[in-house]
Image (cartoon, coloured by chain):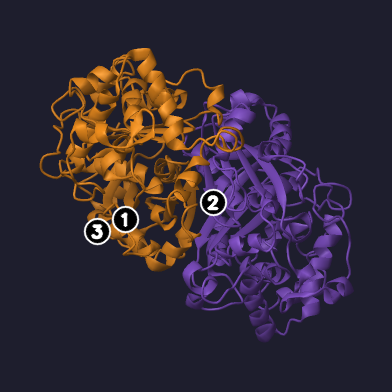
Chain colours: A orange, B purple
Amino acid sequence: MTENVAVIGVGHSKFGLRRDVNMAELCWESIQPALTSAGVTPKDIDFFVVGNAGMWSSEAAIPALLAEYADLAPKGSMRVEAACATGSAAIRVAYSTIKSGLADLVLVAGVEKMQESPNPNVIELIGRFGSYFWEFENFGLTFPGYYAMHGTAYMAKYGATEEDFARVAVKNHYYGAKNPYAQFQKEIDIETVMKSPYIAWPFKLFDCSPITDGSACIILASESKVKELGIDEKVWILGQGVGTGTANLSRREDFTSLASARYAAEQAYRMAGIDPENPAKYLDGANVHDCFTAPEIIAYEDLKFCKRGEGVQLIRDEQTYIGGKIPVNVDGGLKAKGHPIGATGISQAVEAYKQLLQKAEPGRQAEIKEGRWLAHNVGGTGHFTYVTIYGLEKL
Amino acid sequence: MTENVAVIGVGHSKFGLRRDVNMAELCWESIQPALTSAGVTPKDIDFFVVGNAGMWSSEAAIPALLAEYADLAPKGSMRVEAACATGSAAIRVAYSTIKSGLADLVLVAGVEKMQESPNPNVIELIGRFGSYFWEFENFGLTFPGYYAMHGTAYMAKYGATEEDFARVAVKNHYYGAKNPYAQFQKEIDIETVMKSPYIAWPFKLFDCSPITDGSACIILASESKVKELGIDEKVWILGQGVGTGTANLSRREDFTSLASARYAAEQAYRMAGIDPENPAKYLDGANVHDCFTAPEIIAYEDLKFCKRGEGVQLIRDEQTYIGGKIPVNVDGGLKAKGHPIGATGISQAVEAYKQLLQKAEPGRQAEIKEGRWLAHNVGGTGHFTYVTIYGLEKL
């Protein structure tokens, strides 16, 4: 029998353009509240993991930087990366480290200073997470283009419109406006999206998540450490699935779904004891990877919140708002909260913790009945998918 | 009780200048023999981890590249990095993944195409693994300089000479000449080293490990999977320690020792049931991180193969050759075998497997009596240290 693993503390920096802080300071903005909320000190930490893609910023060896700045030396560490699912990959390393008995208390920090690289250079760098030598180098595709192909395929197959995609942006900005850590805290309407300039048809500026600086941090503990410390406020990791896709999109069967996401979701549901055919019934809400608007709708279907082709109806009917079938991205999502790549998966964990413990800010707290929250974090266009399920009650 | 973990298959590419292969092909050179020697197929693999620092090459998302090329999709994956200890960090993720029960069969591949960046650009990129904003950016230090400070400190404190450091290069080239996978397969003498041009005093060209392209791969399995597959040839991971140092060298106490290495070694010895005061007695040999000559001598002391200050006498007396107190780097080490950063720790695991199972090439097989081999892998100048102990008998 391996150890149960709980999130016992969380921290979150302000997301946005953060030229006011250096890398260590930006990390500390989330590490400090995470340690405080867990009631532990750096000396208590056994191991730490940093999620950081980092190709756009000059600082390397961020774990060593934090070893010094956050007084974590000589404890062991590493950096992990899985494109835009980097934060969830870091959580997986911490989770397995505790579950294996190799450590009892692990700090997971995700950070990115993406605005260190000027646009459009950063878009080119992100583009390398697709198929480097073929689709990126030969056809010049970057992420708006990669995902636009998914959006158009979805439109063609299921009759979704640009206005439907805009509805996702409107929802996520609505909740982002209520999240003090979000990059954009301003509501928008469908017209705002429709009138914004095209980036890659059908996506306009307001269909795209932004380039973000930010950090997020969680502290994970073994069940025995939870008992030892007498931790009251915590959420358990009930399961995590992970899948990998092909590098080339030309090797994929379909652009209206991500095979790695379906694979990861199935594993996560099985581990968490959730019916994979009707998971929404068992969940109070979810964070999904809305790097663009269309992929949020595709995520509804890959996660089986509805049948294939019906995701667009969920957003038309406002079923992913609080009070609907399943609230999704009620922290603003990547779209409005921002998407500092290495921090995003950890920011989702912070949100799961806050929602389940009913600590979300006014106007964006979901109703907690089932005591479970899902996080879906995609790297590339399904090159990596991590699905993690958090719960108030351990298995 | 958590699972025991074994290395059940290994593969190693030719190290050197590898402009003849692309990234996927270079990986496959080690993945293919690893799968074959383990007697498994890609479909059997539950999870895979890629060690790659990669800042000098254009390809990102290498796990997705391998998912496609090596037919590993849709299984989960991630990339890990800990500067020059990247390969060992990847092994740690696989080890904890199995030990935690999250997977039974995990493939670990390490790869680097460092020669894609022209010199001296690659030296500048490696330099970022020191203290970026202070020692690297302000003082212009790169790794020959960082480690030269350790070499001179050691000379000043213990009376070692440039000729003493040269002895390490002579030993490692002697064994590299017998390793068909090594970048340099040519013996040298002390005069070769002494006459080579200075890079950073006291280091000359032949005191430095080279810039290398290469890959290495191991397959790890749970004890239950070992039984299920009826695996005969295997070595167990008996323990692994990991430590992190400060980013700034100015925050270190001493330049004649690496605190993270001492910390990691102590953990590894404790896990493996090895007396930390006399570990050489329990080991048939070791691979240590000889990125330059002096750090090999410092490693002898950090690992307690001898007392502090006596490492130089070990190499003078040829006690780290086969037949001596403890054979070290008898595959050529980083110095002669080469140092493709993400592959190095995994190459050390390949060597542990070959030595313990007496499969090393003629002239470089150590005597196997105790059935244990140590691997010491350092990132930065002790920014990260991983120490892993492999054994023929499980604990």
Callout 1: 10 Å neighbours few (<14), some, many (20+)?
some
What is the three-letter code of the residue carrying label 1?
Leu
- Mark 3 or 1, closer to the camera: 1
Instruction: Kindly check if marks 3 and 1 are in contact, taking CB atoms under 8 A apart as contact.
Output: no
Residue at left offset 34%, top offset 27% = A294
Report the disc number at residue B81.
Answer: 2
Label 2: element kind: strand
Quadrant position of residue A7: top left
The answer to whether mark 3 and mark 2 are in CB contact below 8 A is no
Residue ranking furthest to the left: A362
Q: Nearer the viewer, residue A209 or B357?
A: A209
Question: Between tags 2 and 1, which lies in front?
Answer: 1
Q: Is residue B191 shown above or below A113? A: below
- Residue A207 location (% of width, % of height): 31, 34
* Left-right relation of B77 to A25: right
- Specify the subunit that label 3 lies on: A
Q: Which residue is mark 1?
A: A17
| Residue A321 against residue B332 in the figure, above or below | above
Give the quadrant of residue B4.
top right
* Quarter of the figure with the C terminus of chain A: top left
Between the C-alphas of marks 2 and 1, the distance is: 26 Å
Indicate the amino acid at tag 2.
Glu
Residue A148 located left or right of residue B16: left
Q: Between residues A343 and A317, which one lies in front from this camera angle?
A: A317
